[in-house]
Image: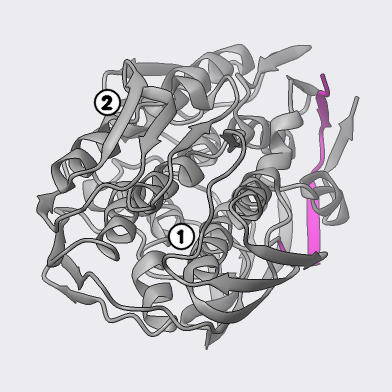
């Protein structure tokens, strides 16, 4: 079991490029595998989560070649996947299991989706219920993995309003809708990331979006295309916060995905007074990309707007670190979804902040954080096998005078395998022990 020892640092500078976007990497494998023709992907995230998706489709007969972050997918067409000889182990990846449950519900063969201890605790009723409405047959124990999907089911399109803001549920149903008879329509009350819709269009599959409604007709085909994966803003977020709270910082993160459904972290930090500049905005493979310059700033506490919560749902652990270094109080409500991520991110972050000497109050659907100083020596934080918890508390060292030890950080490999290397390159002091 690996730990981080994150030691004090005061000056951060330099230019780095964080790894490819995890959401886009997952989807490139899924859609490339069921497309007609050869799809070439560059910038693929070499993290355990996206590699789990890649291995799963190889188990289903798809020829996929990988040289570093360059992937070649020999698409089998929508009905070309074959029955896997054993359960598909998706490790820690909630995106994989939820999106693939939609795709596999329409196949001619049975399949079993499983994962690690953390994934096995995550709620799946949110996809099982609407898929069942479409005609899918999925068994589980208390609606948690493993999922047992029975093939040869005829799916019918549905109109479905998302009960929670979730791109995973939306994408799951859109993938099932590719095979369903009729037009599948998803209604969302809050905007969620739209990578699936964008990528489907890139593969030549029509998707309509209007006034919070996303719809597609079943029965069409996908045609192979080339995909360039931009840098992941969820990974960039750690260094954006590190530079914002450090005493002296001036860093640049190159070619980061600034898809407007993902930039809640930038909007929230801007409200807190962060010094962030976007330059060289351009479109790469249908996604908006920019270089992000971040300098030190005096942050202030805010009430986080409800409309920004779905746009920053994965970044809240590190936003809590920013709030801990802000003047005054930061309040988050309406974020109950954080309790069912890889860990209960509200409670786990609150426990860690308390250990570091930061006053906070846990709410049912959020947290209240009073900015202060990381004042405790010999702090030991438990990650609860959550990669974003591990990295967030490591980032706290850019403002702390004392060492911070974070236990059980092997999970960082799921999304950001070179996190320590890049952190130290800009002046942080993180050691794996």
Residue 159 falls in image quadrant: bottom left
Residue 259: % across, % down: 43, 70
Drawn side of residue 331 relative to residue 263, left or right: left
Which mark, residue 266?
1
Residue 71: % across, % down: 72, 70
Residue 305: % across, % down: 25, 48
Q: On screen, 51 above or below 405?
A: below
* Residue lying at 26% horizontally and 19% vertically, measured from the top left: 364
Q: Which residues are magenta?
A: 1-18
Q: Is residue 7 magenta?
A: yes
Q: Pick the quarter of the image with the C terminus.
A: top right
Residue under circle 2? 365
Q: On screen, 146 above or below 130?
A: above
Crowding near pointer 2: few (<14 within 10 Å), some, many (20+)?
Answer: some
SS category of the residue bearing label 1? helix
- Of residue 334 and residue 224, the one placed in the foreground of this image is 224
* Residue lying at 74% horizontally and 28% vertically, measured from the top left: 409
- Of residue 401 and residue 158, the one placed in the foreground of this image is 158
Residue 174 falls in image quadrant: bottom left
Query: Disc 1 versus disc 2: distance between alpha carbons?
Result: 22 Å
Among the two numbered marks 1 and 2 on one chain, the one whose residue lies closer to the N terminus: 1
């Amino acid at each position: 079991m690996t730990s981080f020892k994150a030691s004090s640092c005061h000056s951060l500078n330099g230019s780095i490029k964080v790894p490819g976007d995890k959401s886009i990497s997952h989807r490139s494998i899924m859609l490339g595998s069921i497309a007609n023709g050869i799809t070439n992907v560059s910038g693929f995230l070499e993290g355990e989560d996206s590699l789990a998706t890649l291995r799963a489709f190889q188990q289903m007969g798809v020829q996929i070649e990988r040289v570093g972050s360059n992937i070649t997918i020999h698409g089998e067409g929508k009905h070309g996947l074959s029955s896997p000889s054993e359960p598909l182990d998706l490790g820690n990846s909630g995106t994989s299991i939820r999106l693939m449950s939609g795709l596999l519900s329409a196949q001619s063969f049975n399949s079993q989706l499983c994962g690690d201890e953390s994934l096995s605790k995550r709620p799946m009723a949110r996809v099982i219920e609407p898929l069942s409405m479409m005609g899918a047959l999925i068994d589980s124990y208390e609606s948690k993995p493993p999922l047992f999907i029975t093939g040869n089911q005829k799916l019918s399109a549905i109109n479905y309003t998302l009960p929670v803001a979730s791109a995973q549920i939306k994408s799951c149903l859109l993938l099932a809708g590719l095979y369903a008879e009729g037009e599948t329509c998803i209604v969302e009350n809050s905007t969620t990331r739209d990578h699936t819709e964008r990528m489907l269009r890139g593969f030549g599959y029509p998707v309509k979006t209007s006034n919070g409604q996303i719809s597609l007709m079943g029965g069409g085909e996908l045609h192979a295309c080339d995909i360039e994966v931009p840098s992941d803003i969820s990974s960039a977020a750690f260094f954006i916060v590190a530079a914002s709270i450090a005493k002296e910082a001036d860093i640049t993160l190159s070619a980061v995905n600034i898809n407007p459904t993902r930039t809640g972290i930038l909007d929230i930090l801007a409200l807190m007074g962060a010094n962030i500049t976007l330059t060289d905005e351009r479109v790469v493979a249908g996604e908006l990309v920019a270089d992000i310059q971040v300098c030190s700033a005096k942050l202030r506490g805010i009430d986080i707007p409800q409309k920004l919560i779905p746009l920053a749902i994965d970044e809240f652990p590190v936003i809590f670190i920013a709030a801990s270094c802000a003047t005054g109080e930061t309040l988050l409500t309406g974020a109950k979804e954080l309790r069912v991520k890889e860990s209960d991110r509200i409670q786990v972050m609150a426990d860690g902040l308390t250990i570091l000497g930061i006053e906070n109050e846990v709410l049912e659907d959020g947290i209240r954080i009073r900015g202060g100083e990381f004042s405790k020596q010999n702090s030991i934080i438990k990650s609860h096998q959550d990669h974003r918890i591990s990295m967030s508390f490591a980032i706290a060292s850019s403002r702390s005078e004392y060492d911070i030890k974070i236990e059980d950080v092997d999970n960082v490999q799921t999304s950001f395998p070179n996190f320590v290397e890049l952190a130290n390159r800009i002046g942080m002091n993180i050691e794996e022990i």
